[in-house]
Image: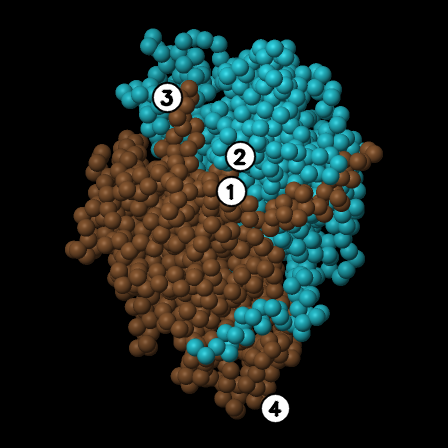
Chain colours: A cyan, B brown
């Protein structure tokens, strides 16, 4: 069954449409089956399509012959107004129809952060659920869920990002009024970056250093009303504003805020786990573990978004590549041009990017499951699995956002000049994705955190302490000695696979496991044998630690891809199963031999794989590319992006590239004004600048 | 002697200023000496500074407390108007003071393509010089040079890019009028992308298929007047317009053009080498070699621009990194934060990017010299060295633009959230640089071209034919057999260096040479032993060919860096010489071990370098990083970018990051309007969107 949202215009098929149609029908499997797997079920897919259809109908974006407004009007004010418009449509639809499709992403499949109304669900409600008291939850959650309050999450400051303990904003308990006083003591303590802060939100969760009776208790969360609900004016003592244009996310008002001795109720402190009473006594703890859980949940969202946004970019690039003709291969005298997809370098790049989007998707499911386990445990007051989940999330977040950003940019480059044009949709997708590497935990900081966790695991193994069962491969990988672990089991066992044995998923996994074990041990040994003070030794060995963390993460990711394929429901069609296992093999093997892979050297340098084996892997990868080439369009169709959400003149489902480009370009206001009113001339420019140069006396 | 343009405001030094000052004074060499080396001489540096000062004074951009207009006004029309403004200032200064500083780059150090007046010198005058007759040169050049005509270079079409022979626009000789008729026969033949075409240029060099007496002679250039010099209106039959917003270059009007049977004089064809006479006879040839030379010259410009734009990005990142404090290293209980530059991963990234900017600079000099040699040869009618120079330019262009784009984006990521903000200057620099990978020859197409040249060299060696002397290393590298070359001399000679021997420039070079020879031979063998038809075999082996081309290019680049250091004038100070040789070693060695290097695996997989040797190289690189860390600011100061041209709130020379960010943000029109007129509220958004959601009945 294929529910098809696309209702192609009944126009004469041109060459591009014909090429697209044949690239689509060459697939061996039904892309709708994969769509259902991606989103959960046919029922969910149907509901999701209905939600997009309603919102796109309200916004008038379903008529793809009309130039989308984000390309026509690009001033700061115009873009923000557009975000408010579709943000409002999305939030109202979510409230009316009670669905989650726009909770974490927008009608353009971006992170909810790019909607002025998006932080409410994505972060503020989450923070309340995890850190507020039951009474506070009852008070606030219904208001936020029905749009009666609009939230921002205020943590980062002008001078402080990832290092939360360095925050400077203070919340001081005032014994005279039994209130907290929120204050920005320095320029660098200005709250800076929070989404929706500039002009959209009414309330914010503010992270501030709690000070009670001159004692500092570290960062705590406070619910602070920032604006009048009546007319939007900032409350006394609060200065709010926009931080200006950014690479993307210009549809929202990332903002700044300063607080000048702003009094708020004592009960505005989130008191789920720490309390300040009216006599000024502090009990409980800031419960940084719960703040961790909040961050973890947000990171699971970021990872899912990385998969989906990368899929968007490569959907556009795939569609353009099967209809764009260029050159004639090596037969330079030949006059028939080839589609650019025909070129090996092009389909190598595009198919490996497609594989990466699926790898991230499956990794995000592993992460979701681990998070949910930790959340259930926490509800019974335990935090045993938190370090594991934190390590897992750090690695998957850092890895997925990096490869999604690099992959999207490469997909964009695959579209040549057209990919540089805003109306291709790719520039904004690339700019939006690359933010993920920085927000919610800067990637290099996260690699360090995963490294620290891995070293602690090794310490636990050495001391015969319990290990999270999911880290058992580490314990199995090393030979224990009396003085602790110091030998790698597998060091003397080079990989013995040849030829097509590399298609075996267990062989692939064993290569990744070997490399992870080797690098973790090497980094751990270098750190613990250093004679320098710990901080210096840590910094000296940072590149090794990062390499180790990356290798562990790669093992986790490959393992997750493989285990998802192994546990596909028995109803899965054989054709889809085959395509997914090819994709998994392409992902695992191309990472080893691809000269662009950041980890490539690791698999090779200790002779675990020989030169001949690498050549075999190259052959196997070439074979996989041939198998997968006819599946490309179906593999991207499966993500089920609407034309309106892709917002791409070169990536529309029907393949009609050139007519759409020209149709949109001709609607640009700068052209319409010149043609309809000014004789084909941009008058201010001609009169003030061009004409004076032409008539210059120089 | 240090001529310093920076006149810091006499304000109280804040912490960031103090940190910057100490990072600057830690250098062991005088950055002005390096500035003179980069630009040629102290005299040129002085003239260049004077030109920037005059233009920046006219534009009012020298007062860095004022928010630059490109961040305040971002509509399509506003950005184009800004480009016209500074483009006019630059061209008028160039004409008045007769200097070349803005011929190929703008007052923001971008490629001249981003100025509406920039294509005139960068491409149109060049095309005339190479392809026009002497009479045509006398007629046109003075007009373009004095701004009496403003040019565009119209080659690419909506459906056609790199593959010039596929162009569809026709120029048909009409025997009745003895004129050419320029015509766009299809939608895909629409001229698309040329800079300045939309609204700025008066004339264009149009590449069109020449048709005379029903015979097609391939692409030729024609000088076509597009607009009235009086009022700017497009001439009859010509439709012109803007192609809309792009990732960058929005200060110019990249445009499209269609021609509906437009008659032009027969003498408008560029007749330096091919002629059509009034009786309709064609003589000469399109001389694709001269078109090659035009492209080559433009590529030398692109490479220089890649160096300089990468240097800009890393200047900003370096300055921000030495004043931004974050976290406390591994000593998590410690309260004093470290500058982010302190972290090994940060200075590894930043210093290797600095090294890359210099590597590109020196490679561009090698390319310039080769181009000049070829140009001189051509003026005597010979084209012997053209294939070599074409291969050289293909490789250096593809390599430099890729590493510049990746490096600039990584430099941007090094600045965390602040790097995502437009006022950091980095988003636009990254977006501008990444265009270089696509324009003037798409990089993957260029790698193929270099590969084809390398294989031809191998064929020549096998047949004992002459080789360009600069390719002698290939001939030396292989053992000739009766049946042609098929053995690598060095295959049985692993690298024997240990420890600090890797600092030896010859050792570094030998590693690169070995890898290049190995990969070229492997790709050549795979291609020629394939049993498939040539075009298919070529495509099958494309990834090997690209790897071979990359490796040859890396060898060329490392070799160029080293030979520039070896031939420094004897007056060079020892301190500078030492720093440059460290930088060269860092470049060569980090490319081998850096897990992000696209070539890393190649140096390792055939056991040319052992595991232990790679660990030695890592140690040597760590030592180099320690030596170079105090030189970072001076190494970027040396590029001598003015604050106005960097246009970065976080990259100003004095280090005053936070105050500048807030000063600029507060001047944003969206904030000023809200604060000064609207009670701190963005009124249209609040009234139409936020208030209705708050008051919603849902």
**Front-lying residue, A32 or A448:** A448
Residue B257: image x %, image y %? Answer: 61, 70
Is residue A10 found left or right of A666 in the rendered image? right
Q: Spatial distance from mark 1 to mark 4, Cα to Cα? A: 68 Å
State the residue position of label 4. B176
Q: Quadrant of residue B471?
A: bottom left
Q: Kindly check if marks 2 and 1 are in contact, taking CB atoms under 8 A apart as contact.
A: yes
Q: Badge 4, how many Cα within 10 Å: few under 14, some, many 20+?
A: few
Disc sitting over residue B238 in the figure: none
**Front-lying residue, B260 or B43:** B43
Q: Which residue is rendered at x = 51% and y = 20% of the image?
A: A218
Residue B519: image x %, image y %? Answer: 36, 47
Quadrant location of the N terminus of chain B in the rendered image: bottom left
Is residue B450 found left or right of B492 in the rendered image? right
Q: Which residue is rendered at x = 40% and y = 64% of the image?
A: B54
Disc sitting over residue B662 in the figure: 1
Disc sitting over residue A524 in the figure: 3
**Front-lying residue, A233 or B576:** A233
Q: Identify the subunit bearing mark 2.
A: A
Nearer mark to the viewer, of 1 and 4: 1
Residue B181: image x %, image y %? Answer: 60, 81
Q: Which residue is rendered at x = 38% and y = 41% of the image?
A: B12
Q: Identify the subunit bearing mark 1.
A: B
Q: Identify the subunit bearing mark 3.
A: A
Give above or below for A200 relative to B513. above
Q: Spatial distance from mark 2 to mark 1, Cα to Cα? A: 9 Å
Precedes in sequence: disc 1 or disc 4 = 4
State the residue position of label 2. A190
Q: Spatial distance from mark 3 to mark 2, Cα to Cα? A: 39 Å
Q: Is residue B472 visible?
A: yes
Q: Kindly check if marks 3 and 1 are in contact, taking CB atoms under 8 A apart as contact.
A: no
The kind of secondary structure element at disc 1 is: helix
């Amino acid at each position: 069954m294929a529910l098809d949202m696309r209702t192609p215009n009944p126009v004469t098929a041109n060459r591009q449409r014909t090429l697209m149609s044949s690239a689509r029908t060459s697939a061996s499997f039904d892309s709708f089956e994969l769509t259902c797997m991606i989103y959960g079920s046919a029922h969910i897919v149907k509901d999701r399509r209905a939600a997009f259809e309603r919102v796109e109908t309200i916004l008038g974006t379903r008529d793809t012959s009309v130039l989308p407004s984000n390309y026509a009007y690009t001033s700061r004010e115009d873009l923000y107004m557009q975000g408010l418009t579709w943000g409002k449509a999305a939030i109202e639809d979510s409230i009316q129809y009670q669905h989650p499709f726009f909770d974490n992403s927008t009608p353009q499949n971006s992170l909810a952060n790019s909607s002025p109304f998006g932080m409410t669900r994505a972060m503020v409600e989450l923070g309340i659920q995890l850190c507020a008291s039951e009474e506070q939850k009852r008070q606030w959650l219904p208001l936020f869920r029905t749009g009666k309050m609009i939230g921002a999450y205020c943590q980062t400051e002008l001078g402080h990002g990832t290092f939360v303990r360095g925050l400077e904003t203070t919340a001081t308990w005032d014994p005279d009024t039994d209130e907290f006083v929120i204050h920005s003591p320095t320029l660098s303590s200005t709250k800076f970056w929070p989404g929706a802060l500039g002009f959209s939100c009414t309330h914010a969760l503010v992270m501030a250093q709690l000070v009670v009776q001159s004692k500092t208790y570290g960062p705590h969360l406070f619910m602070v009303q920032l604006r009048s609900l009546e007319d939007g004016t900032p409350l006394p003592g609060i200065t709010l504003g926009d931080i200006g244009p950014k690479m993307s996310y210009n549809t929202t008002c990332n903002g700044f805020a300063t607080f000048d001795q702003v009094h708020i109720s004592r009960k505005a402190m989130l008191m789920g786990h720490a309390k300040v009473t009216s006599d000024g006594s502090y009990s409980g703890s800031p419960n940084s573990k719960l703040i961790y859980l909040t961050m973890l949940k947000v990171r699971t969202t970021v990872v899912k978004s990385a998969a989906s946004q990368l899929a968007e970019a490569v959907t556009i690039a795939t569609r353009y590549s099967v209809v764009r003709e260029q050159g004639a291969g090596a037969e330079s005298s030949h006059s028939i041009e080839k589609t650019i997809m025909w070129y090996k370098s092009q389909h190598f790049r595009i198919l490996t990017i497609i594989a990466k989007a699926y790898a991230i998707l499956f990794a995000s499911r592993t992460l979701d499951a681990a998070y949910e386990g930790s959340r259930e445990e926490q509800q019974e007051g335990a935090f045993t699995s938190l370090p594991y989940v934190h390590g897992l999330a750090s690695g998957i977040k850092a890895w997925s956002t990096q490869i999604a950003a690099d992959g999207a940019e490469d997909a964009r480059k695959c579209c040549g000049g057209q990919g540089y044009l805003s109306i291709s949709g790719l520039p904004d997708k690339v700019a939006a994705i690359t933010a993920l590497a920085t927000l919610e935990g800067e990637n290099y900081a996260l690699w360090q955190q995963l490294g620290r966790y891995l070293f602690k695991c090794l310490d636990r193994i050495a001391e015969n302490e319990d290990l999270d069962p999911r880290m058992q491969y580490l314990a199995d990988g090393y030979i224990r000695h009396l003085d602790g672990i110091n030998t790698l089991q597998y060091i003397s066992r080079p990989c013995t696979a040849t030829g097509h044995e590399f298609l075996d998923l267990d062989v692939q996994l064993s290569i990744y496991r070997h490399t992870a074990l080797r690098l973790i041990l090497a980094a751990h040994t270098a750190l613990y044998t250093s004679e320098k003070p710990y901080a210096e030794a840590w910094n000296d060995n940072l590149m090794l630690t990062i390499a180790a963390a990356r290798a562990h993460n790669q093992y986790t990711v490959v393992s997750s891809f493989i285990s998802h394929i192994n546990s596909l429901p028995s109803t899965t069609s054989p054709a889809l199963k085959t395509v997914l296992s090819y994709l998994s093999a392409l992902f695992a093997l191309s990472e080893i031999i691809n000269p662009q892979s950041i980890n490539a050297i690791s698999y090779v340098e200790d002779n675990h794989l020989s030169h001949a084996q690498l050549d075999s892997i190259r052959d196997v990868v070439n074979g996989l590319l041939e198998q997968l080439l006819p599946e490309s369009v179906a593999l991207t169709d499966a993500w089920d992006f609407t034309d309106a959400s892709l917002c791409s003149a070169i990536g529309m489902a029907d393949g009609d590239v050139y007519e759409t480009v020209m149709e949109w370009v001709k609607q640009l206001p700068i052209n319409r004004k010149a043609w309809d009113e000014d004789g084909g001339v941009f008058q201010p420019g001609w009169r003030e600048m061009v004409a004076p140069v032409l008539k210059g006396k120089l």
